[in-house]
């Protein structure tokens, strides 16, 4: 469960409780909920073409390639609040559909489409059955009506001689196998890639057990956007993916990474013994093309703004050698994924030409349904963990000259000659991104171009000059329409100070105001970390909004669904709007103050009270009316009230009785790791109440470490967070002195001021109430 009321983690136990989700109904075998699976390097995709229809597009490269079109009895894909019920008994169900195929092994062939049913027999022993669909078909081998009664079904090739009766009372999953005409099951290459299509329509399931309960609630729109990617969602239908996004309250933009391993076409290179990226016969493989066209059309119909994101990263085993970034040792740049991906060299004409072709293909596809929004995601020169920068491929060496040999590692201080090489590498990177942006705008002149950069790497403290190469000044505004930041290493480490400093550094270097920025936060790689990491992600969203970033993305949907992350109000910035302005000080100087608590008191029949304190700290209320002394004051007050839209927007108020720290206040003890500490004030002696100071007055804060005043080495961030450049040593006391304001709002949406009563000596009532931040 979430800790702050604005979000929670919905687990499986929660999902089955009626009070935790709305329930609807679907027919079993609903086309939206089928998936595909297959071995690399082949590709397949399933899309829905109607309420009872779907299509599979696939490309085969090898003689043992086999794809499965899968129906699972348990929904492990969707968010817990949106899953369909687990139901493994199919004995009362019948299934019928029309089958049409092209480019595929036909229904009547030995290795023709087969329904594999995995589960347990009547005795509970695990086993599988293989049902030849041709045995239940009427029509031709490529256009047939298929009818299946799961209560009277048999596997086996020839019926009735080889019948293997199916017991369909305990099924885990079933899948239809799809293979190319040249399939042998043996290791080997097909003479040429084989593209196929299967169309299934009129799909109908009837009988007892044919209806499934499904989570059908809609989380109210909360203002956050979502990120996803084809490498994570290629096996799902776009209809299913978008159903989740809508159901979980995400609206506006969807950042969709087209991926690094599933969209390209391949050709067999006998010399290398590898399948390498190819443009032969088209740009995208048929599966990726069909999937993305369906995704974009459906997203547009739902009023989403899809952002197509492309990176310089591709699966290493399919990339031409002269496209790859390399270190001084000649080894290609390799990520830590398994299998690893590599990074394309910005200096390689072949690599950049390929990316421009990919970008324009996707841009043309997007232009068919609306405005083009295209992101270049984390384009950079790869840096290994030891600081080695991969600017040594042949193309880069030719462009950068012999001076490149002087730059192996980017860690530590570098000479002028070395930084000049990094500047030149940055210029190459900027030129490559500019060429892609120009190509996209050549397809759609009004295309919005966005750039995503990963701050923890680019701004690494031990590599202070790396930004020259990986955040080049050539990216400065207005090179792109929006600058986007991602910083999940900072977030998952709980280092809010590093997040704020990184965003400020990047904005200052590239000149994009907060209104032209987007912020991405996430992701939780290991589900075991969900309970500790999602709270930090939620806090990072709140902090980014406080910095004025208007658009916030959760990265990414697979982790959201897996962990049940459910957001309600983190994104409703307007509801918590705050104008960082002072209430007119002269009006507030005579205000009265009334601290208040909330205590629930229950009196028993015997007259004994039971008291429960709902709040740990008092909430302040003020009345600024006594400060209104003239008609000019009334005019000032009314203008300020209108500007705040009544109670809608908060503002600063100086408490006339309590507005400074009263000397040094201890705000933390160093542990050698933490760099961020919140300003607090301790009130009282016996049982002190600790309250957060979120609105310190600029220029009033002084910090001491272990008793010594610090003139530098720290920064005051939004929300009263003190961020140190270096973590204070373990045991060192951190103290702060400051002047502060109270965040407040008008208590009501109306303000009644009568000139006649004012002139008669009656002060107006101007109630204000403290905002908890």
Image (cartoon, rainbow, N blue to C red):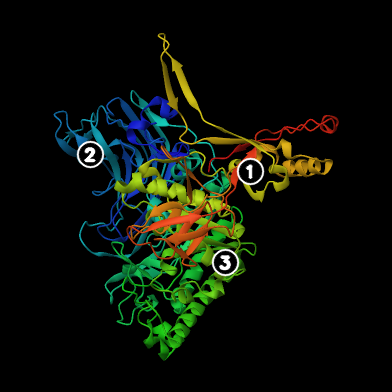
Classify mark 2: helix, strand or loop.
strand
Instruction: Please name which of the two marks, 1 or 2, marks the residue nearer to the observer.
Output: 1
Q: Name the residue that disc number 2 marks.
A: 118
Residue 111 lies, with reference to residue 402, above or below; the image says above
Residue 35 percent across, percent down from the top left: 36, 45
Q: Name the residue that disc number 3 marks.
A: 440
Mark 3 closeness class: few <14, some 14–19, many ≥20 residues within 10 Å: many
Instruction: Please name which of the two marks, 1 or 3, marks the residue nearer to the observer.
Output: 1
Lower sequence index among marks 1 and 3: 3
Classify mark 1: helix, strand or loop.
loop
User: Is 284 displayed left or right of 307 in the figure?
Assistant: left
Residue 397 lies, with reference to residue 598, above or below; the image says below
Q: Is residue 294 visible?
A: no
Lower sequence index among marks 2 and 3: 2
Lower sequence index among marks 1 and 2: 2
Residue 711 percent across, percent down from the top left: 50, 67
Query: Decide: marks 1, 3 in contact (CB < 8 A)?
Result: no
């Amino acid at each position: 469960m979430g800790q702050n009321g604005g979000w929670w983690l919905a687990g499986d136990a929660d999902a089955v409780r009626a009070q935790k989700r709305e329930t609807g109904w679907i027919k079993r075998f609903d086309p939206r909920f089928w998936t595909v699976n297959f071995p690399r390097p082949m590709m397949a995709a399933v899309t829905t073409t109607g309420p009872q229809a779907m299509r599979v597009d696939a490309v085969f490269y090898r003689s043992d390639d086999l794809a499965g079109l899968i129906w699972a009895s348990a929904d492990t894909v969707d968010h817990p609040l949106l899953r369909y019920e687990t139901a493994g008994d199919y004995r009362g169900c019948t299934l019928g559909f029309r089958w049409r195929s092209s480019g595929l092994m036909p229904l009547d062939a030995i290795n023709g489409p087969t329904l594999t049913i995995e589960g347990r027999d009547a005795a509970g022993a695990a086993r599988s059955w293989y049902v030849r669909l041709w045995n239940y078909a009427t029509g031709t081998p490529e256009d047939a009506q298929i009818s299946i009664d799961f209560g009277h079904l048999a596997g086996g090739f020839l019926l009735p001689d080889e019948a293997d009766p199916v017991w369909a009372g305990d099924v885990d999953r079933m899948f239809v196998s799809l293979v190319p005409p040249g399939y042998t099951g043996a290791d080997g290459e097909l003479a040429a890639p084989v593209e196929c299509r299967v169309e299934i329509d009129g799909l109908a399931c009837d009988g007892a057990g044919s209806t499934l309960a499904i989570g059908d609630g809609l989380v109210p729109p909360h203002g956050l956007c979502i990120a996803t990617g084809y490498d994570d969602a290629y096996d799902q239908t776009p209809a299913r993916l978008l159903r989740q996004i809508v159901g979980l309250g995400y609206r506006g933009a969807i950042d969709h990474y087209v991926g690094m391993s599933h969209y390209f076409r391949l050709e067999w290179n006998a010399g290398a013994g590898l399948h390498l990226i190819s443009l032969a016969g088209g740009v995208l493989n048929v599966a990726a093309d069909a999937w993305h066209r369906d995704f974009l059309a459906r997203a547009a119909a739902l009023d989403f703004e899809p952002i197509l994101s492309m990176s310089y990263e591709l699966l290493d085993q399919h990339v031409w050698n002269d496209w790859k970034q390399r270190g001084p040792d000649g080894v290609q740049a390799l990520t830590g994924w398994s299998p690893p991906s590599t990074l394309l060299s910005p200096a390689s004409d072949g690599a950049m030409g390929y990316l421009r072709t990919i970008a324009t293909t996707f841009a043309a596809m997007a232009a068919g349904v609306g405005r083009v929004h295209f992101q270049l995601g984390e384009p950079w020169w790869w840096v290994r963990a030891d600081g080695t920068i991969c600017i040594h491929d042949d193309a880069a060496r030719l462009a950068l000259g012999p001076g490149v040999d002087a730059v192996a590692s980017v860690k530590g201080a570098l000479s002028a000659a070395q930084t000049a090489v990094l500047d030149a590498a940055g210029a190459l990177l900027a030129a490559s991104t500019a060429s892609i942006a120009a190509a996209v705008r050549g397809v759609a002149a009004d295309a919005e171009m966005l750039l995503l950069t990963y701050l923890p790497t680019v701004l690494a403290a031990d590599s202070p000059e790396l930004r020259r190469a990986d955040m080049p000044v050539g990216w400065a505004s207005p090179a792109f329409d929006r600058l986007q930041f991602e910083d999940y290493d900072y977030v998952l480490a709980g280092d809010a100070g590093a997040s704020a400093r990184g965003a400020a550094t990047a904005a200052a270097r590239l000149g994009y105001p907060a209104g032209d920025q987007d912020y991405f936060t996430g992701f939780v790689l290991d589900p075991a970390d969900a309970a500790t990491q999602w709270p930090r992600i939620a806090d990072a969203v709140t902090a980014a909004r406080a910095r004025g970033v208007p658009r916030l993305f959760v990265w990414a949907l697979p982790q959201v669904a897996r962990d049940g992350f459910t957001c309600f109000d983190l994104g409703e910035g307007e509801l918590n709007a705050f104008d960082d302005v002072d209430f007119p000080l002269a009006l507030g100087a005579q205000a009265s103050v009334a601290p208040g608590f909330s205590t629930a008191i229950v009196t028993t029949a015997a007259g004994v009270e039971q008291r429960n304190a709902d709040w740990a700290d008092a909430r302040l209320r003020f009345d600024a009316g006594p400060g209104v002394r003239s008609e000019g004051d009334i005019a000032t007050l009314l203008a300020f009230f209108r500007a705040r839209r009544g109670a809608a927007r908060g503002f600063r108020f100086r408490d006339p009785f309590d507005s400074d720290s009263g000397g040094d206040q201890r705000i933390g003890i160093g542990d050698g790791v933490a760099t961020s500490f919140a300003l607090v004030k301790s009130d009282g002696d016996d049982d002190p109440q600790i309250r957060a100071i979120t609105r310190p007055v600029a220029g009033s804060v002084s910090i001491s470490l272990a008793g010594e005043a610090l003139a530098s080495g720290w920064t005051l961030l939004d929300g009263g967070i003190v961020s140190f450049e270096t973590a204070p040593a373990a045991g060192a006391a951190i103290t702060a002195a400051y002047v502060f304001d109270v965040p407040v709002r008008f208590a009501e949406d109306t303000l009644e001021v009568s000139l006649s009563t004012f002139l008669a000596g009656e002060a107006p009532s101007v109630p204000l109430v403290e905002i908890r931040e």
